[in-house]
Image (cartoon, rainbow, N blue to C red):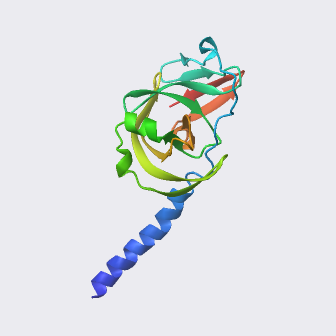
Amino acid sequence: MLLRTLVFAGLAALLATQIPAVMTLVDRVPEPASGTAETPSSAKAQPASVSPGRVRLSADGRGHFSGQFRINGKTVEGLVDTGASAVTINESTARKLGFGVNSLDFRYQMNTANGKTDGARIILDRIEIGNVRVRQVDAFVLRDEALSSTLIGMTFLKKLKSFQVEDGSLTLIP
């Protein structure tokens, strides 16, 4: 009986310490600036390799850093967002990446620039851009109506050795 109580107490302590950490992963998931003007495809930022293992993204016409990422082996257009606590994708992208939307557990309350919404926590096997590869990245899935694009947030950026913005470019250093 004492052993069961100790095991239960240990599990309760583990959950009490880990759930708050997961809940604080995403305190803000902002939407990209909305507007009717489209950025011409020629103005889209393309990754430029700086040196082996480094990637530089040039800012687009609105000052955003975006590029073609490979998430779990699939190409996804992503916007690097240092204001997003976590990588965040919508349901459509989750399906493209092989996550069954019906099996996602939308139990996390998320605060976004557009208000509160529910999110499902997932782990992405890998995110790549150019020569930069990061494995086992915490991410959240939001409903399509809550998020229109993929945000590459801090759960990706924190796994890098460093990243820096200088002269209109973002350099990612693994």
Residue 29, x across and y down, in percent = 61, 45
| Left or right relative to 151: residue 4 | left
Is residue 47 visible from the viewing direction of this image? Answer: yes
Instruction: Tell me the residue at 52%/18% (across/down).
Output: 51
Across the whole image, how many numbered discs are drawn on residues? Answer: 0
Residue 94, x across and y down, in percent = 42, 39
Instruction: Tell me the residue at 68%/28% (across/down).
Output: 165
Instruction: Tell me the residue at 50%/31% (across/down).
Output: 174
Residue 39, x across and y down, in percent = 65, 19
Which residue is farthest top? 42
Residue 63, x across and y down, in percent = 70, 25
Question: In which quadrant of the rendered view does residue 31 lie?
Answer: top right
In depth, the one of 20 and 53 nearer the eye is 20
Which residue is farthest bottom? 1
Instruction: Tell me the residue at 42%/74% (across/down).
Output: 12
Is residue 135 visible from the viewing direction of this image? Answer: no
| Left or right relative to 88: residue 7 | left
Quadrant including the N terminus: bottom left
In depth, the one of 111 and 86 nearer the eye is 111
Question: In which quadrant of the rendered view does residue 167 lie?
Answer: top right
Task: In the rendered view, tell whether residue 97 sits above or below residue 103.
Answer: above
Question: In which quadrant of the rendered view does residue 126 lie?
Answer: top left
Task: In the rendered view, tell whether residue 58 sits above or below residue 113.
Answer: above
